[in-house]
Image (spheres, rainbow, N blue to C red):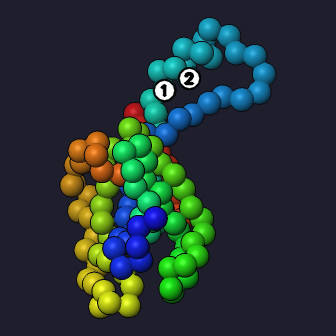
Amino acid sequence: MIPLAERVLLQLWWTDATNVAGGWHDAEDLARFATNGAWEASNTGWLVHEDDLCYVLAGRMTDDGANVGLIERIPKAAVTRKAVLRGQCGPDAGSPAVTPAAPDDGPLPMSWATSTSTLTARLMA
């Protein structure tokens, strides 16, 4: 787990998996689903863990950082971009300025990734 003083508020964007449940599907249904693009999801949270395979975000955290909630693991291989929304937290971190990401920041290297408590998704054309 990342120590409290080193945690950052992070927003991640990733390509999410989708499925069609229920019933049988003919060739036309299959073709429409297979070529309909992918969902891009976005989430924001405190980065509480990172390893070679994933980021773990917590949407909620107690003031002392001992307890977290709304945790989500996002595979790094699916992440398309990320933005640090707030620097380090904790009692010794002061009051870091919030630096929102510009909408045209573009993709980041695949070694970067993350999540949030508010999920937004849109169908990519």
Residue 86 at x, y percent in the picture: 32, 75
Given the current orientation, which residue lies at the most extreme top position?
27
Query: Residue at left 41%, top 43%?
Result: 53
17 left or right of 100? Answer: right
Q: Is residue 16 visible?
A: yes
Q: Is residue 40 visible?
A: no
Residue 11 at x, y percent in the picture: 38, 61
Q: Which residue type does callout 2 highlight?
A: Phe
Using the image, tell me which numbered label, if any, was put on residue 36: 1
Would you call the spot at circle 2 few (<14 residues within 10 Å), some (14-19), or many (20 or more)? some
Residue where numbered disc 2 is placed: 33
Mark 1 vs mark 2, CA separation in Å: 5 Å
Query: Residue at left 48%, top 61%?
Result: 57
Query: Residue at left 62%, top 17%?
Result: 29
Q: Are marks 1 and 2 in contact (CB under 8 Å)?
A: yes
Q: Secondary structure at mark 2?
A: helix
Query: Residue at left 28%, top 46%?
Result: 111
